[in-house]
Amino acid sequence: MVAAVTVLAVLQRPIPLVLTLLAGAVGLLLVGRRAGRLLAAVAELAAAAGGGGRG
């Protein structure tokens, strides 16, 4: 659920990668080690959505 919120936030506003990583880390701690793959996917989506280019 945290991942979904993070993705929605990234789609609405280009959040810095730092905040995305923090949110992912919190979600990882809450969900467990299994969230590692999900975190990686979210990080890639966030980087593609917000880190594609500034401007």
Image (spheres, grey):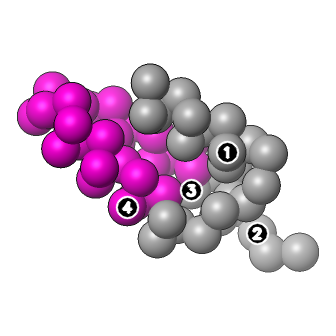
Disc assigned to residue 22: 4
Given residues 15 and 53, the one toward you in this image is: 15
Q: Residue furthest bottom?
A: 54
Question: Which percent across, then down, holds residue 12?
Answer: 79, 45
Q: Is residue 49 left or right of residue 46?
A: right
User: Which amino acid, by three-letter code, is at mark 3?
Assistant: Ala
Q: Nearer the observer, disc 4 or disc 2?
A: 4
User: Which amino acid, by three-letter code, is at mark 2?
Assistant: Gly
Question: Which percent across, then down, holds residue 11?
Answer: 74, 42
Disc 2 to disc 1: CB gap under 8 Å = no
Q: Earlier in the sequence, mark 2 or mark 3?
A: 3
Mark 3 to mark 4: distance in Å? 14 Å
Question: Which percent across, then down, holds residue 44?
Answer: 48, 46
Disc 3 to disc 4: CB gap under 8 Å = no
Local SS, label 4: helix
Q: Is residue 21 left or right of residue 7?
A: left
Mark 1 to mark 3: distance in Å? 13 Å
Disc 1 residue crowd, few under 14, some 14–19, many 20+, Cα 10 Å: some
Disc 3 residue crowd, few under 14, some 14–19, many 20+, Cα 10 Å: some
